[in-house]
Image: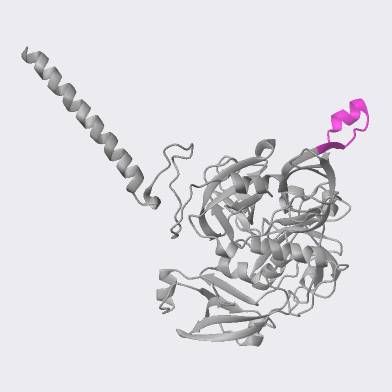
Amino acid sequence: MKKNVQFFFVACLGSFISLFSAYLFFYFNNNVPNHLKYSLTSSKNILPVLNNGNSSSSIIDFTLPAEKSLPAVVHIKTSSEQINNLSYDPFADWFFGQQKRQQGYTQQGSGSGVIISDNGYIVTNNHVISGADKIEVTLNDKRSYVARIIGFDASTDVALIKIEQKGLPFLLYGNSDLVKIGEWVLAVGNPFNLNSTVTAGIISAKGRNNILDNNKRPIESFIQTDAAVNPGNSGGALVNTNGELIGINTAIASNNGTYQGYSFAVPVNIVKKVISDLIEFGSVQRAFIGISIKDIDSKFASDKNINQLNGVYVNGINNGGSAEDAGIKEGDIITKIQDINVGSVSELQEQISRYRPGDKIIIALLRNNKPIEITLTLKNLNNTTSLIKKTESLTLNMPSVGAEFTQMKPEDLAKFGFENGIMITKLYSGKLSLVGIKEGFIITSIDKKKIIVIEELKRIFDDKKGLILIEGFYTNGVKATYSFNL
């Protein structure tokens, strides 16, 4: 009897606890503030309700931005004819006659692109279409077109192609300056040829640099996100929860070539300027302040007696540049460009990349720890305010080494089996002619580092001191190496 009474008592206690717990659950669900609730019935029950400081809240829903972006993101497939130079085998020639020394093959690649206008303009990465003989674009509805290259910019890894079609769905530009760390985003593209793939993540950081091949491109200020991005996503869309384009997915940080939690996108405000220049001029109108700059850390600030860590240190002034004309001095600390704070070299480069030669900007800086403002007129590489016309090539005249250079087009380089190269189009008295370099020589690397854009060439020749090693080839296929002192 005692055991039965004990069991009965335990059963009643358990029932009471269950009923009381149910009461508390319903009371909590009906009275707790909205911004603390979690969805218990939705498949998104791992996601908190968004409040954003407003009284009205809603569950995170990615269906709207996905519906907006999917029709505007395309699959890009490229192909190019390549030549393998076979090694010489004297025994094969002796027994079988003279052998063919070249063997052709077709190299194929793939990536993504974003339609930005209803008449067929598509933005993608330069590395997706670089060297391609044929570019095929497949829309989300499976229609296919052959695209042509409008222009490209290796410095930002942005390219513009076009298909001949009207009435296409396209994405609207957002504002990458307003993007906040922790904000939800979607990455849309075609990883591993899996068409129309959508992944979600948050903004992990802004202004990331030194991501692409040890910073071989001079302009890097990436948006970092943890949305899954893999090979094939390059050139695809990074969109916010309103379905607006805020970046072009470009790179991943990985030890094995696949996604490991870090991906990077070119901010859309840079993309807009590059695309506008490519449509209007055929090449990017790049502006320069005319300074060498350095990030500030605590040790450097202590050594230079600087009382703050925000800003960019002016390490040197280029002769004849915009900074020299405006009165900027070595040791100044640039803190703002047009009321936009710049706390690192990458952030400063991002802001300047939005302007053209001839544009006037206001620079806020510290001199001897005192704030001042300077109005500056930006110049191009040749220290003028001239813009490059659509019919002109991107050229650079450097009397300091006695040569004129022209940046070659990817389609021309592909004929020789190279992806990068700057041609010496004119030689006169100077260091290059003294070492035996001839006109028509195409520079591919300096000091074992690939030269992608003509700005890199100028920067190296301006800053380099001592022995320099130049490698490249002539159009007849002869490779050559030259070394001399600067």
Residue placed most toward the observer, 392 or 249: 249
Residue at 56% across, 42% down: 259
> In x, y percent, where is residue 342?
53, 71
Percent x, y of residue 219: 64, 63
Q: Residue furthest right?
A: 97
Q: Quadrant of the C terminus?
A: bottom right
**Looking at this view, is 425 or 93 the one in front?**
425
The x, y position of residue 123, in whole percent, is: 74, 54
> Residue at position x 57%, y 84% from top?
329
Q: Is residue 227 magenta?
A: no
Does residue 253 show up?
yes
Q: Relative to 428, does residue 24 appear above or below in the rendering?
A: above
Image quadrant in which the N terminus is located: top left
**Residue 210 makes an appearance in the image:** no
Please state the extent of the stretch shown in magenta in the rendering. 88-106
- Seen as rendered, the residue at the extreme left is 2
- Above or below, 268 against 7 in this view is below
Left or right of 451, for residue 104: right
Question: Which residue lies at the image location 48% right of the left edge and 47% below the top edge?
Answer: 59
Depth order, front residue of 429/103: 103
